[in-house]
Image: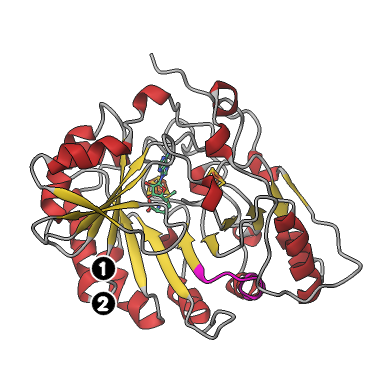
Amino acid sequence: MTERVIPLLDERVAAARPPLPWVLETPTGHLADTLRRPLRDLRISVTDRCNFRCTYCMPREIFDKDYRFLPHGDLLSFEEIVRLARIFIHHGVEKIRLTGGEPLLRKDIERLIEMLARLTTRSGAPLDLTLTTNGSILARKARALRDAGLRRVTVSLDALDDTTFRQMNDADFPVADVLEGIESAAAAGLAPIKVNMVVKRGVNDGQILPMARYFHGSGHVLRFIEFMDVGSSNGWRMDDVLPSAELPRRIGEELPLEPIEANYHGEVAERWRYRDGGGEIGVISSVTQAFCGDCTRARLSTEGKLYLCLFAQSGHDLRALLRGAASDAQISTALAHIWRRRGDRYSEIRSAHTVRLRKIEMSYIGG
Ligand code: SAM
Ligand code: SF4
Ligand code: SF4
């Protein structure tokens, strides 16, 4: 029987209001944490709700009809999100990813995208604005997202086999609709599309080759992600993790591969190219080969709490500052203080003990 850790307390309350700084700082774009990691990426969760119940993320036993999602008034408004995004950009953020829950369920998400797409980085370049979606309503939304200024999209897809896919999303959602979403996104100009597959041993590892064959030559980049111990509700066990490093060998036996250079320093996916010119795949070994040393990501929850690590146990309540009439300079300085103290490197120190700690849920903070 699978051992399941049920969260007894709601981690969403565990966030301290950062103290208001007395001495204000001008951001230089060169913030560094205790491990000398800069702040470059911001992931913003725009909703904690989802129309799927992926077993590894929002297991139905916990996220059931009695689960209390955040009330609308607790969510950051689009204006609040954009205000914070500007402050993060002044500190060096160049890439923003919208996530959730399912971000396409947030009402008028196109309006937020339009507002964020107008922002530029410190050097005046367009912001690298992207979004991760389960693809369920992407076919309907792709054109509007592109028109609003979205540049790229990542679609999560764990199986090609319809039965396996329906079991994993636990919402009886058909795979054909997600595949249609991917093609609509490509047609709308959101290509190249990254397709993320979470691999759980004994559940969908039989889908690795079918997925590789399907996306070979499609122009989309399939990336394999190890099942992670995020949150406290998905009953994670190391035995369920299939080390990603094994996959290029498995796939390569049928479709020969060769390793290629990272696109940029700190890229989390290890890249492999098909020798026959059929495109590339990526493997993300979040569990078996930690990449904390290059982690430049901050995460903002739906209700405006800042988390410095995917596996954080508590956050920093930026919404309290926003709604408490703090100035931009005060929030910016508070953020600088928080980032400078950051020392998170969970994946490097994962142990039987840390796995059992209560952590924030993936559906709350986004991937
Ligand atoms: N709902 C959107 C989606 O599924 O793409 C966005 C949010 S979802 C939390 C972001 C990503 O996290 C997805 O690619 C999902 O597969 C991944 N994810 C969720 N739980 C995970 C886990 N336990 N281990 C690895 N990846 C996980
Ligand atoms: Fe929803 Fe994404 Fe989590 Fe699946 S992984 S339950 S689609 S938030
Ligand atoms: Fe970054 Fe935390 Fe993941 Fe390490 S465990 S890569 S610090 S999010």
Query: Which of the 4 image quadrants contains residue 6?
Result: top right
**Residue that mark 2 sits on:** 189
Q: Which mark is residue 181?
A: none
Task: Residue 223: give x, y in percent of width and height.
Answer: 29, 50
Task: Residue 363: give x, y in percent of width and height.
Answer: 49, 47
Figure quadrant of the N terminus = top left
* Magenta stretch in the rendered image: 86-95
Density class for disc 1 (Cα within 10 Å; few <14, some 14-19, many ≥20) is some
Q: Outermost residue, right direction?
A: 22
Left or right of 168? Residue 237 is right
Q: Residue at x 54, y 53 (%)?
A: 295
Q: Amino acid at mark 1?
A: Pro
Please, is residue 257 above or below residue 1 in the view?
A: below
Would residue 91 be counted in the magenta stretch? yes
Task: Residue 258: give x, y in percent of width and height.
Answer: 20, 51
1 vs 2, front mark: 1
Left or right of 65? Residue 215 is left
Q: Amino acid at mark 2?
A: Gly
Query: Which of the 4 image quadrants contains residue 144?
Result: bottom left
**Residue that mark 1 sits on:** 192
Instruction: Report the coloring of the rendering.
Output: secondary structure
Question: Element type at marker 2?
Answer: loop
Q: Is residue 163 visible?
A: no
